[in-house]
Image (cartoon, rainbow, N blue to C red):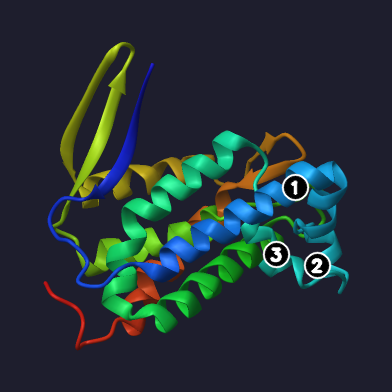
Amino acid sequence: MGTIIPLSDASRRPAHFPLMTLLIIVINGFVFVQELLGGEAFVLNWAAVPANIVGGHHWITLLTAMFIHGSWSHIIGNMIFLWAFGPEIEDAMNPLRYVAFYLLGGLVAMLAQVIANSHSTVPNLGASGAIAAVMGAFLVTYPRDRIRVLLVIFFFVRVTLIPGALLIGVWFLIQLFNAGSVATVQTGGIAYLAHVGGFIFGAVFGRLFVDPDRIAQ
């Protein structure tokens, strides 16, 4: 078995400290602590249930669900991906545009899953959709950048460089392959259609949020 863990953009360094990316990570961590304290009831109260949304109830969960995670591996994996791609996109957009883009990407991702599974009562949660939007924006903003990754194959561990377009492209194909299915993660689910929706939003609209005075090709 093997895995690839993205670490950072090896082709450029942000000109500004990624304060908002770090703040989003801190907020996710804080909410996860509340989940550990509140248990299943907390998750079910704040995760997005498509049937409830379509019925006109708990619309706020479209926003709150993107800060909830089902397990340690879920939140750690998401935050690693956010830290790998977020700083460069925050730097290109500016902090306020970046936060607006991140939240809109997350909302679009959640709505994509709600529309596709409108009668589902499975709670959907996680920052994956918003992070997928960031990855989509990264692909169209810095298509030639190389990503520093940790390559793990059984006992073989090595830090190497992979073209960002290849890494993100393969990730997106996996999401398409799994689209329509929901993988159970403890008390909630990870929706692949949300990933696809978020990514498409980021790839299509990401450049509109870029600050021309900040971007450097």
Circle nearer the N terminus (3, 1) = 1
Q: Nearer the viewer, mark 3 or mark 1?
A: 1
Mark 1–mark 2 Cα distance, whole angstroms, equals 22 Å
Q: How many numbered circles are shown? A: 3
Q: Which residue is mark 3?
A: 64
| Front residue of 114 and 144 | 144
Mark 3–mark 2 Cα distance, whole angstroms, equals 13 Å
Report x, y in % for residue 98.
Answer: 41, 76
- 117 vs 76, left or right, is right
If the image is split into quadrants, where does the N terminus sit?
Answer: top left
Which residue is painted at 84% across and 69% down in the image?
58
Residue 14 in sight in this render: yes
Q: Amino acid at mark 3?
A: Thr
Res. 35 mark:
1
Residue 68 in sight in this render: no
Q: Nearer the viewer, mark 1 or mark 2?
A: 1
Mark 3–mark 1 Cα distance, whole angstroms, equals 12 Å
Report x, y in % for residue 118.
Answer: 77, 60
* Neighbours of disc 1 within 10 Å: few (<14), some (14-19), many (20+): some
